[in-house]
Image (cartoon, rainbow, N blue to C red):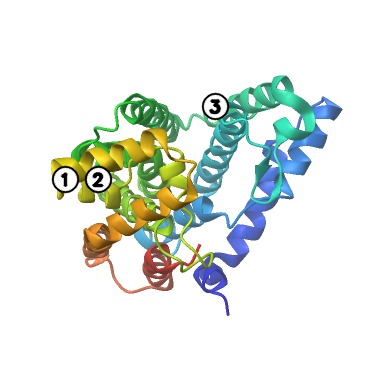
């Protein structure tokens, strides 16, 4: 059995029910919109976000969840889908998960409007049901994701990111959404237990940090794709292995690396040399060590919860994040 199916087992029924609820939450009177949202729904990914919401809710609440849990998961998916549609426009990207993006098929103007529609659907789903506590969790996540993207753009121009700034960028860009899923799952069933909600938020944040560092490592390792890609180098992205290597080399080496990234990032031979440099300077080993440290911090937060299929699945999910091959 595939690991994702294994993780899903204890919430299989809930996930099936969720798909129907999610489909209904996208309904519109405009035929064009329905055609586009239908296209989006049929090309969904692994659905990690609702899985985090449901597993967290059930782990902290003796296996029980409620309508608020479903709504919270739907709102997260709606708003996340909206940000992806907008991202594809911003990045001028024609593909998403191997399929054509909305902007590739229907052009930018429609894609932006579809993103706005999904965003408003998410907001109204919470407001119509007085789920203001859940809406606040999601709204904070969206604000942080936008700030993280802009912080990364601002810093990438100068290639002077410190390790602390890097953590802040990935916390906002990637970890904040997984943190929102976990805190939202807890809040949907135990709204008055602020400490529990914060604990699960932190769990999600650590999972997200480990997830992003793993993504950074793919650029340098040939696990997933048969060869290192160097895409991050081509895009002048400062990732943890590179930051560590730059902090642990001579001034001459540093100048050469920065010059390579700024002015020679399309030269395949030069990119390969930078990859080798980062590996030789123990950049990968250091990043891996940090990834495992975040994984351990997340595991420690689950230690107090009694054993259950839901806790077991969350641990499986955490291990999957650091062991995945793509």
The N terminus - image quarter: bottom right
Identify the disc placed on residue 123.
Answer: 3
- Say left or right for 216 vs 302: right
- Residue located 43% across and 34% down the image: 138
Residue situated in front as seen by the camera: 276 or 241: 276
- Residue located 47% across and 33% down the image: 131
**In the image, which is nearer the foreground, mark 3 or mark 1?**
1
Q: Which residue is mark 2?
A: 243
The image shows residue 297, relative to residue 136, as above or below, that is below
Residue 29: x and y, percent? 81, 25
Q: Which residue is mark 1?
A: 247
Badge 3 or badge 1: first in the primary sequence: 3
CB-based contact (under 8 Å), mark 2 and mark 1: yes
Label 1 Cα neighbours within 10 Å, binned few <14 / some 14-19 / many ≥20: some
Q: Marks 3 and 1, Cα distance to the nearest angstrom? A: 44 Å
- Residue located 77% across and 42% down the image: 39
- Say left or right for 150 vs 48: left
Q: Residue furthest bottom?
A: 1
The image shows residue 107, relative to residue 192, as above or below, that is above
- Residue located 36% across and 54% down the image: 273
Q: Residue furthest right?
A: 31
Label 2: which secondary element: helix
Residue 292: x and y, percent? 26, 64
Q: Marks 3 and 2, Cα distance to the nearest angstrom? A: 38 Å
- Say left or right for 12 vs 215: right
């Amino acid at each position: 059995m595939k690991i994702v199916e294994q993780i899903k087992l204890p919430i299989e029924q809930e996930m099936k029910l969720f798909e129907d609820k999610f489909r209904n939450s996208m309904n519109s009177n405009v035929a064009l919109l329905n055609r586009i949202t239908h296209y989006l729904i049929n090309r969904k990914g692994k659905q990690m976000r609702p899985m985090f919401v449901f597993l967290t809710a059930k782990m902290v609440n003796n296996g029980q969840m409620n309508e608020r849990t479903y709504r919270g998961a739907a709102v997260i998916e709606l708003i996340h889908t909206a940000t992806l549609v907008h991202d594809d426009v911003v990045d001028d990207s024609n593909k998403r998960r191997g399929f054509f993006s909305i902007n590739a098929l229907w052009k930018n103007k429609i894609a932006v409007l579809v993103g706005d529609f999904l965003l408003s659907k998410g907001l109204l789903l919470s407001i119509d049901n007085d789920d203001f506590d859940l809406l606040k969790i999601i709204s904070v996540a969206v604000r942080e994701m936008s700030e993280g993207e802009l912080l990364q753009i601002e810093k990438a121009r100068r290639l002077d990111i410190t390790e602390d700034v890097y953590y802040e960028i990935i916390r906002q860009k990637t970890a904040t959404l997984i943190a929102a899923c976990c805190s939202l799952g807890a809040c949907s069933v135990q709204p008055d237990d602020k400490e529990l909600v914060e604990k699960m938020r932190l769990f999600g944040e650590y999972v997200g940090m480990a997830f992003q560092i793993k993504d950074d490592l793919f650029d340098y390792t040939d696990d997933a794709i048969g060869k290192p890609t160097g895409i991050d180098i081509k895009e002048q992205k400062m990732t943890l292995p590179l930051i560590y290597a730059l902090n642990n080399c001579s001034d001459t080496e540093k100048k050469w690396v920065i010059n390579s990234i700024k002015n020679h990032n399309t030269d395949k031979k030069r990119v390969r040399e930078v990859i080798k440099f980062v590996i030789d300077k123990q950049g990968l080993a250091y990043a891996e060590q940090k990834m495992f440290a975040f994984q351990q911090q997340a595991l420690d937060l689950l230690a107090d919860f009694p054993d259950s299929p839901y806790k077991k699945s969350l641990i499986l999910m955490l291990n999957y994040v650091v062991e995945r091959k793509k």
